Image (tube, grey):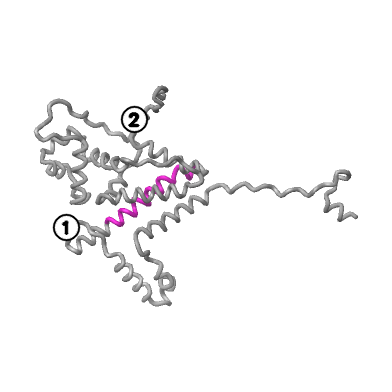
Amino acid sequence: MSDAAAGTPAPPPPSPWQRERPARPHGTPARAPLSRERVVEAAFTVLDRQGFDGLSMRQVAAELGVAVSALYAHVSSKDDLLELMYTRLFDGYAMPAADPERWQEQLRDFARTWRRRLMSHRDMARISMGHVPFTAELLPHVEALLAVFRTAGLPDRIAAEAGDLISTYIDGFVLEEGMWQDRAAQQGGAASPARPDWHEMADEMRNYFASLPAQDFPHLRALSGLMVADTSDERFDIGLEIILRGLASYLPAPATDPAPEPDADPDTGNTAGNSAGTA
């Protein structure tokens, strides 16, 4: 039920994906006071520095200068911590009200925003791919996204799959970007991930495709100048556009007005064409 006075809907019931977490501690602060928020911030620091494979409760505790056991007053496990990090990505974001005239533009904005948020932390796409936004905190985001699909007129079967399709595309794209960043960092001996020189790599690939024997690889040669986009942004937008146009193909065809009947003779009931033909 809703609170009629405040107009605030009641929270949804607990979902099967919601984890039990320890209650926030009360009482006298410890010498090095902790909070759930500080633990999550420290986890992001470790993630950015060492990547997903280097993220551990021990490393987070070391970042905070506390014993590992102190973390468990705020998070129940590493999986719980990863879920909190995933939930943090949604902070400050809200889908606009669904507009059937602008549904594709709204989805473009959503996809580009979500990609930027995933790119704000190293390996965040790996965490995102391992979680579903079905907790009480995140269900409103899912509801708003589904509203865009259904308000646009997509069939329910397509609307039910479209959100997961777009999210998986974004996660996969950012995951690939992160892998290239890590590879570039390893080859360059850098201490932190650095973006590869995409223009140099793109030119190498174009030149290679163009040099292939025409009799064996006619299509690769023909498309050599188009196989590699100039920027990751451009490549992301092209892939997103393919998805959106595919979704649009499921929209029902607009209704067309039936052709008007020819004027009939009020005396004979014959149309003008029939009268001319029998004259």
- Can see residue 154? no
The residue singled out by tag 2 in the image is 14
Q: Is residue 81 left or right of residue 253?
A: left
Residue to which mark 1 is pinned:
191
Name the one closer to the observer, 198 or 81.
198
Mark 1 or mark 2: name the one nearer the start of the chain.
2
Q: Position of residue 216 (x, y in %)?
A: 41, 75
Judging from the image, what secondary structure is the residue with disc 2 in?
loop
Q: CA distance from mark 1 to mark 2?
A: 42 Å
Q: Secondary structure at mark 1?
A: loop
Question: Toward the viewer: 96 or 260?
Answer: 96
Q: Amino acid at mark 2?
A: Pro
Q: With respect to residue 13, does 39 lie above or below?
A: below
Going by the numbered disc 1, the residue's amino acid type is Ala
Left/right of residue 14 with respect to residue 150 in the rendered view: left
Side (left or right) of 41 relative to 129 = left
Vertical side of 44 occupied by 180: above or below: below
Residue 8, x across and y down, in percent: 39, 27
Label drawn at residue 82: none
Asked if the stretch drawn in magenta spans residue 216, the answer is no
In the rendered view, would you say 157 is above or below 273? above
Residue 177 in which image quadrant: bottom left
Segment tinted magenta in the rendering: 156-178
